[in-house]
């Protein structure tokens, strides 16, 4: 009951991520992305399956980074991805490099290269107890570099097989090598053409078997071709050219040949458009040499070129509409000449040729009926004659090449096959050719997926994983749609083609819709004017036009034409049509052979061969549509990665365990989960640097247990072992993770990290608070210490000052005392001389000596407010006047106020008062600044409270 919740949530996530291709594009969080793949290190990844996570985006970035650094080859698991440099890179393909790869004990450790694939296949054959044949499948879109790569592989084998031959005569080896290699220029001259996408585009598919003897030496080869685009002979797409061989003849023929071939300088041929464009592929001499090497005699060569020249002449024959329907179309004068020329070159009767082209023979029982053709029909018959002749000539050439290079069955024991097939095609208008090509690609894709799945499974097994891709959905439903019996697109198309009636696109469309509407891989746009059907291929949907499909499938060749050619005086022409005489074959037999059925049969036999061999895939990628060197267009590459199955491999990875992390890295990143989950597991391992893989595995398992426990606790449900295994697996050296498991781990890690961050924040804040508080306390302490130090310093200074003052004061006092005593001694002496009661002696201006006063005496005082002298302050403000002053003086001197006994009056003396001192026996000494001692003998009141002699009653500091 508890299981469904988590299962539902995890598995929904799992299904969503695994099933939807777009989910693979999900940008992962920057941090995990950086952990899994370091972007600046992307170019170092030699294998695309090692980028983490394997998504189209990371794969694309990796390829781009490598291309920028001129690294053109990258592994993608069991596939090799080859980016076209579109410029010569001679050092990459030299003979030395070939031998280097061949002689290396472990070529896999070298940089990715097509030679690794070649060498691996070569060693596979050699190393087996019962040698297994090998197949090198080279695919990609037009111009991606398939032909180049196939050539490279053939050169490699020609070199390494020859280099290993010590006991054979060099001559023999060279002859075989040469022949094998010479088959290339011939086939390219006859089967390649300049198209908008590639100047040297192969217009046929081929499978070359390189035959090896028991000593693994190259002893021969054989070629099987598929679906030559023969319509090109009579109908070239705009801005494209016919097959190279016609231009080679035009450019390279001698005058004699020109005369013979009716190919004058400046002669224009309708079927040779863009003849002014010269290509490096137009080397006629090279083709002639190759023909010679392969043993095509000069006579046969002459016949071949005569036939080709005849075809060119035919192209210039145009029919005019006949006004009378009972009469065949007429020819203008020029066309008559060209027809005559064609007939001469093909060595047939010109009249017969014209009749064959413009009159149809209808068979009614034993009677035959002649029916003039319309202009269009006549043109079709003309084209048909050219196409069938060229196709038969090409077939014959291939057979000849095979006869020339194929070793005797008793000589060779094994082979390495090189398959160079057209890639997935999707144009504006797609017809039967595209249907066949895409069908072949579907077949190869299925083969590839099965092989890749096997390779993945093998890796899982080697890592000890018990998991299988049993539920992986491949492209079977699309194949069922096309080839399915009893009802499929091909069978319905064949049925329509075999009916002896005019083909009608609408009828076929209705039949397709009625019979196949249950298949999810087919759809229709009901609003489209043109009848068509859309097939959902693995590489994307392609809409096929039904119009003309049945006719193309029938590929009818008017029997009159074949009969005519069989009468030709050119032996080769007779030969290539021999055995095809319509009279010798029953109509039933003929009607059986449609283009589709022929193609399907040849593909089936190819698939049988592929299934019996060990395949090696090379996916060629065209980095830009303009064939420019060092230009990488992301969209262009992405669509090719999808079309060549690399994205499929990514889906396969996603269906399994797309993320693989070595134990050590895993523990380093996720060890924190164990540490912070209250469990002892998983935490310390990364810190202590585990060395043993076994211990690391144990730690990882513990850690995963913790994660699951937590997930269960969080979601209150349980996960069974089966579900665990669908999410994560511990291999022998790595942890295999599904996308949902990665997200689970990442979520857990993030939660823990944010909890840790919160704890760190709390600690930090607490620490900051404490630090602040202690700072405050310290500041207070320092302040107190400084203050006390300042006070102490001040006190010390005060002490010192007081001591100085005291000292000085003491000295001063002593001095005064001594002076006073000296004065007193003088006064005594005077007193002894002057008897008491005498009138005061004025000693000094402004001062009086009061003694035994009978009359109120005038005390000449001090001009300033002596009264203020009694103020606590030692600084006296001199503002008081008159009585105030007198009173204040009285008060300050603390003199008893005895009315009438004395009076104090302001002295005229403006000098400042220094001090007032007590005199002996009650006298007061008014001490002036200048000579205070002059007042020492003044005695204002004998009954005063002044006690001390010479005591300072009041003093003003200066
Ligand atoms: N490895 C390479 N180094 C240098 N140039 C290359 C390489 N591969 C391809 N090219 C260039 O790219 C061009 C197209 O390559 P190629 O003819 O092999 O394409 P293709 O896939 O066979 O195309 P098609 O399907 O049309 O035949 C070549 O003519 C060559 O100039």
Image (tube, helix red, strand yellow):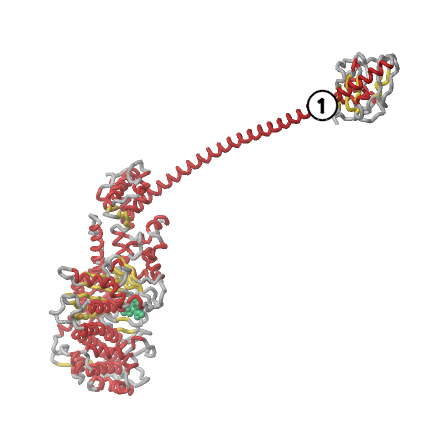
Q: Within the displayed image, which quadrant is ligand 1 positioned in? A: bottom left
**Which is more toward the observer, 617 or 604?**
617
Which quarter of the rendering shows the C terminus?
A: top right
Q: Identify whether 783 is placed above or below 139.
A: above
Q: Identify whether 699 is placed above or below 374.
A: above
- Residue 465: x and y in percent read 21, 48
Q: Give the quarter of the image for residue 263.
A: bottom left
Q: Identify whether 352 is placed above or below 131.
A: below
Query: What residue appears at the point 21 percent right and 74 percent down from the top-left corner?
Result: 178
Q: Give the quarter of the image for residue 205.
A: bottom left
Q: Give the quarter of the image for residue 187.
A: bottom left
**Which is more toward the observer, 186 or 591?**
186
The residue identified by callout 1 is: 811
Label 1 environment density (alpha carbons within 10 Å; few <14, some 14–19, many ≥20): few
Say whether residue 663 is left or right of residue 348.
Answer: right
- Residue 704: x and y in percent read 27, 42
- Residue 824: x and y in percent read 80, 17
Say whether residue 70 is left or right of residue 601.
Answer: right
Q: Is residue 360 visible?
A: yes
- Label 1 CB, ligand 1: below 8 Å? no
Q: Is residue 596 visible?
A: no
Q: How many marks?
A: 1
**Which is more toward the observer, 192 or 905?**
905
Which quarter of the rendering shows the N terminus?
A: top left
Mark 1 secondary-structure assignment = helix
């Amino acid at each position: 009951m508890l299981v469904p919740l988590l299962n539902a949530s995890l598995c929904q996530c799992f299904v969503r991520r695994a099933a939807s291709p777009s989910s693979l594009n999900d940008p992962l969080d920057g941090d995990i992305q950086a952990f899994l793949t370091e972007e600046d290190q992307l170019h170092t990844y030699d294998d695309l399956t090692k980028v983490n996570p394997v998504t189209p985006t990371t794969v694309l970035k990796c390829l781009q980074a490598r291309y920028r650094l001129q690294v053109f080859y990258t592994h993608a698991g069991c596939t090799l991805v080859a980016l076209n440099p579109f410029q010569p890179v001679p050092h990459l393909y030299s003979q030395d490099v070939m031998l280097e790869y061949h002689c290396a004990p472990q070529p896999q450790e070298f940089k990715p290269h097509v030679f690794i694939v070649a060498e691996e296949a070569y060693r596979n054959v050699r190393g087996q107890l019962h040698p297994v044949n090998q197949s090198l499948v080279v695919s990609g879109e037009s111009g991606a570099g398939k032909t180049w790569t196939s050539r490279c592989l053939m050169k490699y084998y020609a070199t390494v097989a020859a280099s290993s031959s010590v006991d054979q005569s060099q001559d023999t080896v060279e002859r075989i090598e040469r022949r094998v290699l010479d088959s290339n220029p011939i086939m390219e001259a006859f089967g390649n053409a300049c198209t908008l996408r590639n100047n040297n585009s192969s217009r046929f598919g081929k499978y070359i078997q390189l035959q090896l003897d028991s000593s693994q030496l190259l002893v021969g080869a054989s070629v099987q071709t598929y679906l030559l685009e023969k319509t090109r002979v009579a109908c070239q797409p705009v801005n494209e050219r016919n097959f190279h061989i016609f231009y080679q003849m035009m450019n390279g023929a001698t005058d004699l040949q020109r005369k013979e071939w009716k190919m004058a300088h400046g002669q224009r041929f309708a079927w040779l458009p863009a003849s002014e464009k010269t290509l490096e592929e137009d080397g006629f001499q090279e083709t002639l040499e190759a023909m010679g090497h392969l043993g095509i005699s000069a006579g046969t060569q002459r016949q071949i070129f005569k036939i080709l020249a005849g075809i060119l002449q035919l192209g210039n024959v145009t029919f005019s509409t006949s006004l009378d329907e009972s009469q065949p179309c007429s020819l203008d004068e020029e066309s008559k000449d060209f027809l005559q020329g064609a007939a001469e070159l093909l060595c047939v009767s010109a009249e017969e040729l014209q009749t064959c082209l413009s009159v149809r023979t209808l068979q009614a029982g034993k009677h035959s009926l002649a029916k003039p053709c319309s202009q269009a029909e006549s043109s079709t018959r003309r084209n048909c004659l050219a196409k069938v002749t060229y196709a038969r000539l090409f077939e014959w050439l291939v057979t000849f090449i095979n006869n020339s290079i194929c070793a005797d069955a008793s000589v060779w024991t094994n082979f390495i096959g090189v398959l160079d097939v057209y890639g997935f095609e999707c144009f504006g208008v797609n017809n039967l050719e595209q249907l066949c090509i895409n069908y072949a690609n579907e077949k190869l894709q299925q083969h590839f997926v099965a092989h890749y799945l096997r390779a993945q499974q093998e890796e899982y097994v080697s890592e000890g994983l018990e998991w299988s891709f049993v539920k992986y959905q491949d492209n079977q439903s699309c194949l069922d749609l096309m080839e399915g019996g009893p009802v499929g697109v091909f069978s319905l198309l064949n049925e329509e083609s075999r009916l002896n009636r005019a083909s009608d696109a609408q009828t076929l469309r209705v039949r397709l819709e009625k019979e196949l509407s249950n298949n999810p891989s087919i759809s229709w746009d009901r609003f489209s004017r043109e009848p068509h059907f859309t097939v959902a291929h693995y590489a994307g949907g392609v809409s096929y036009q039904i119009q003309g499909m049945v006719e193309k499938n029938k590929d009818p060749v008017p029997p009159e034409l074949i009969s005519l050619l069989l009468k030709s005086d050119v032996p080769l022409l007779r030969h290539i049509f021999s055995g095809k005489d319509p009279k010798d074959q029953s109509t039933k037999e003929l009607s059986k052979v449609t283009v589709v059925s022929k193609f399907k049969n040849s593909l089936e036999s190819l698939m049988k061969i592929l299934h019996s061999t060990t395949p090696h895939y090379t996916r060629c990628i065209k980095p830009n549509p303009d064939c420019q060197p060092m230009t990488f267009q992301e969209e262009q590459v992405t669509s090719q990665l999808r079309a060549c199955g690399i994205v499929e491999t990514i889906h396969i990875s996603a269906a399994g365990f797309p993320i693989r992390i070595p134990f050590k890295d895993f523990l380093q990143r996720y060890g924190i989960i164990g540490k912070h989950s209250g469990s002892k597991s998983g935490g310390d391992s990364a810190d202590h640097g585990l060395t043993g893989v076994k211990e690391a595995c144990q730690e990882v398992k513990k850690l995963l247990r913790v994660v699951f426990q937590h997930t269960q606790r969080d979601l209150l449900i349980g996960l069974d072992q089966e579900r665990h295994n669908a999410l994560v697996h511990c291999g022998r050296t790595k942890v295999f993770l599904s996308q949902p498991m990665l997200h689970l781990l990442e979520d857990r890690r993030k939660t823990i990290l944010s909890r840790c961050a919160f704890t760190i924040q709390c600690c930090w804040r607490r620490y900051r608070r404490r630090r602040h508080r202690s700072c405050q306390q310290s500041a207070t302490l320092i302040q107190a210490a400084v203050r006390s130090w300042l006070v102490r310093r001040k006190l010390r200074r005060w002490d010192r000052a007081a001591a100085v003052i005291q000292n000085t004061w003491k000295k001063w006092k002593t001095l005064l005392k001594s002076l006073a005593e000296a004065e007193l001694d003088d006064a005594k002496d005077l007193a002894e001389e002057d008897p008491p009661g005498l009138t005061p002696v004025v000693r000094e201006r402004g001062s009086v000596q009061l003694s035994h006063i009978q009359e109120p005496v005038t005390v000449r005082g001090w001009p300033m407010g002596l009264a203020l002298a009694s103020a606590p302050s030692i600084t006296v403000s001199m503002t008081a006047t008159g009585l105030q002053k007198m009173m204040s003086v009285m008060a300050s001197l603390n003199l008893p106020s005895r009315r009438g006994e004395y009076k104090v009056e302001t002295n005229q003396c403006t000098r400042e008062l220094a001090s007032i001192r007590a005199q002996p026996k009650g006298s007061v000494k008014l001490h002036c600044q200048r000579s205070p001692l002059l007042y020492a003998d003044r005695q204002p009141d004998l009954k005063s409270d002044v006690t001390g002699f010479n005591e300072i009653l009041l003093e003003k500091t200066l």
